[in-house]
Amino acid sequence: MAAMDYADVQKSFKGRTHLLLGNGFSIGCDPIFKYQSLYDVAVEKGLSPNAQAVFGRFGTNNFEGVMRVLMDANWVGQQYGLLHGDDSELLKDVEIVRRALVAAIAESHLDYSGSVSDEMKESASAFFYPFYNIFTTNYDLVAYWIVMAGGPHPKYWDGFGEDLDEPDADHVVFSFHVGNHPGIFYMHGALHLYVKEGVVAKHCWSRTGEKLTKLIKAGMADGRNPLFVAEGTSGKKLEQIHTNSYLSYALSKLNRIEGTLVVLGHSLSSQDQHLRDIIAGNKKLKRLFIGVRDAANPAKAKEAVASIELRRDERGHEPLEVQYFTSDSAKVWP
């Protein structure tokens, strides 16, 4: 099946249409978000030699892929009696790689929203506008900045509001469900979110006058680490999601959308099988449009779709209407 032009995708929108973003969206804004760039920063920040060797051995700069390799190696070692207990060096390096990813994103991130030109914000805002809900697995602030560029009353709500216990606090907290209002949901957490005494809080520029990146780094120095679900496998990600009220809510929201879902900059790989399963299990979802970089060979996307269709069939749901479009034709960024 040939990939469509995004203009033709838009013409076919009917009813509510939603958007799922992956890292390709942020890379389109700035190459600093490429895994290679993040890896270079992680090495500078002290990524362990063993972890670096694993990256090199497998010829990858994919942090989650390396975490998966380390977790699989630990399992094999346990299975063959070579390792005992849950305190192996392999699992320690899984956590080291995870922390290195968080630190690299925070350290290398664009300094503030003004780092993205008005022209780029306007272009991305226009791309967002037709969508009812926006779901993103990205940890960076780009999608947040685009939404907030809409002014003091942005179209998309995120469920964060005043902390009733600390109304004058420099943060806001996850305090309400957006209901039938358009929303933006950070499926795997984000730099500006953190857990405060069991509650998910959000750094807030409007309450402090400080750049979000400065607030985030100060928070990390003070032990308020960003809420990140950066595990090596989908199962581990799902475990982390279910321990957090905000992340569980975001995932359940994806499970309840209806109509059409557009996927951009996201491969829906097996490391995100939980997202595939949610899409497969949502009976109200009728159509799926997936952006691909290589129009002639959308192999990764087709593998993901095959998994979704299989699970959907197992549940007895009617098939999804699936189409592919070329990511570049969406022209998110000028």
Image: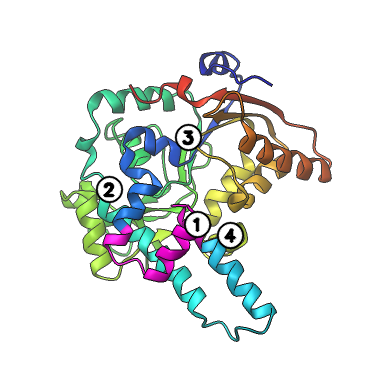
Above or below, 177 against 220 in this view is above
Reply yes or no: does residue 328 show up in magenta.
Answer: no
Residues rendered magenta in the picture: 42-66
Crowd band around label 3 with a 10 angstrom C-alpha radius: few (<14), some (14–19), many (20+): some
Q: What is the spatial separation of the Cα atoms under label 1 and label 4, in whole angstroms?
A: 8 Å
Which label sits in the foreground, 3 or 4?
4
Q: Which residue is mark 3?
A: 182
Mark closest to the chain's N terminus, 2 or 4: 2
Residue 257: image tag: none
Q: Secondary structure at mark 3?
A: loop
The amino acid on which the numbered mark 1 sits, given as a three-letter code, is: Glu
Q: Secondary structure at mark 4?
A: loop
Mark closest to the chain's N terminus, 1 or 4: 1
Q: Where residue 228 sits in the image (x, y, percent)? A: 43, 59
Q: Secondary structure at mark 1?
A: helix
Residue 332 appears left or right of 132: left
Q: Where residue 104 sits in the image (x, y, percent)? A: 32, 56
Decide whether the magenta segment is chiefly helix, strand or loop: helix
Residue under the point 62% across and 38% down: 300
Q: Which residue is mark 4?
A: 233
Above or below, 74 against 148 in this view is below
Residue 206 appears left or right of 183: left
Q: Where residue 44 sits in the image (x, y, percent)? A: 26, 61
Crowd band around label 4 with a 10 angstrom C-alpha radius: few (<14), some (14–19), many (20+): many
Task: Determine whether label 1 and label 4 are within 8 Å by CB.
Answer: no
Which label sits in the foreground, 1 or 3?
1
The amino acid on which the numbered mark 3 sits, given as a three-letter code, is: Pro
Crowd band around label 2 with a 10 angstrom C-alpha radius: few (<14), some (14–19), many (20+): some
Q: Which residue is mark 1?
A: 64
